[in-house]
Image (cartoon, grey):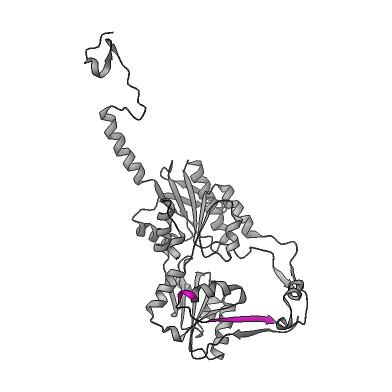
Amino acid sequence: MKCDLPESSNCLNGKAIIPVLNGRTLPKILESARMENTEKRNGNRLKLFSGTANPALAQEIASDMGLELGKISIKRFADGEIYVQLQESVRGCDVYLIQPTCPPANENLMELMIMIDACRRASAKNITAVIPYFGYARADRKASILQMGDVNLCNLSLLTFALTLQTQGRESIAAKLVANLITKAGADRVLACDLHSGQSMGYFDIPVDHVQCQPVILDYLASKMISSNDLVVVSPDVGGVARARAFAKKLSDAPLAIVDKRRQGHNLAEVMNLIGDVKGKVAVMVDDMIDTAGTIAKGAALLHEEGAREVYACCSHAVFSPPAIERLSSGLFQEVIVTNTIPVGDHNYFPQLTILSVANLLGETIWRINDDSSVSSIFQ
């Protein structure tokens, strides 16, 4: 076959050369198209999808990041089964699924796992489960119980106290089970806000980025211009001391007080004691969540009895199970400050309630994960 084109381009010794499209040598007409497609693919490599648990937060995160939420269809059949279909391609993409496992926890958890499975089967490159509120986090160990009836904890040595504590038998550690389920569904990474205990991160066999909502709440408190001399940070129970101490350190190293609950005997009422001075102070109670508000309401009543001038309640997760609203709106609190990791319905609103958004915090964290940048530096 004779070639009529110039020898230097497509011919060798009078014979035609068939071009090999190996990604390095492309015809100009295809090269420009490839450049456009590459730019488009890189621009769409990060995709956000929302479940049905907290779509308002997901939309706020997407808007803050300058992105649009991916198209997804989530339905429930008549028998309660969940159907998920991605309505756009995620092949080769870094996918972030925003779905807190808040009440109803079982439904929202199952929906998240089906979303993960759909992305995995659609060839997503990386799947990150963004779980602003991680349900079952409180079931992170077997419960400890006191074996002695009439004891005074103040008079016990550390060894004696340890011997009186035993774990309940035949209990599940549900936090570990849920971590396994999310991992087996196909998640490559988890992003969670203010886990009930740090040990929950170790239950996952995949990377976990732990986002603290403290900066959002601290910024809001700073705007209230409360004098550091008038401030005291209060832990509503002994288990939250580390959290309250870290919070106090960020508030100009404010003093710390602790509400200590103890039961003197089997059939005796629980007694609450205050460790620390709150007289004439503005008390800020700090916890990771408010569920029925029993602990924090009893603590607030004690603070008022001890002479606190005002009491604020600050928490990341507003679970608000009945009768939380009645307790929180009873006049014990000057203000109840929560974030929107869990959607708060209109029926749960009361005048003292302030809801802060963590959308900016989560959006920045997602960008850093996607860019392989440090996440911990946000909180330093």
Quick one: 202 or 123, which is closer to the camera?
202
Q: Is residue 265 above or below residue 191?
A: below
Quarter of the picture holding the N terminus: top left
Q: Is residue 291 above or below residue 205?
A: below
Note whether residue 320 is visible: no
Quarter of the picture holding the C terminus: bottom left
Quick one: 335 or 377, which is closer to the camera?
377
* Stretch in magenta: 249-262
Q: Is residue 256 magenta?
A: yes
Q: Position of residue 319 (x, y in %)?
A: 53, 69
Residue at position x 39%, y 53% from top?
A: 69
Q: Which quadrant of the figure has residue 149?
A: bottom right
Q: Position of residue 275 (x, y in %)?
A: 60, 84
Note whether residue 305 is visible: yes
Quick one: 268 or 272, which is closer to the camera?
272
Q: Is residue 372 magenta?
A: no
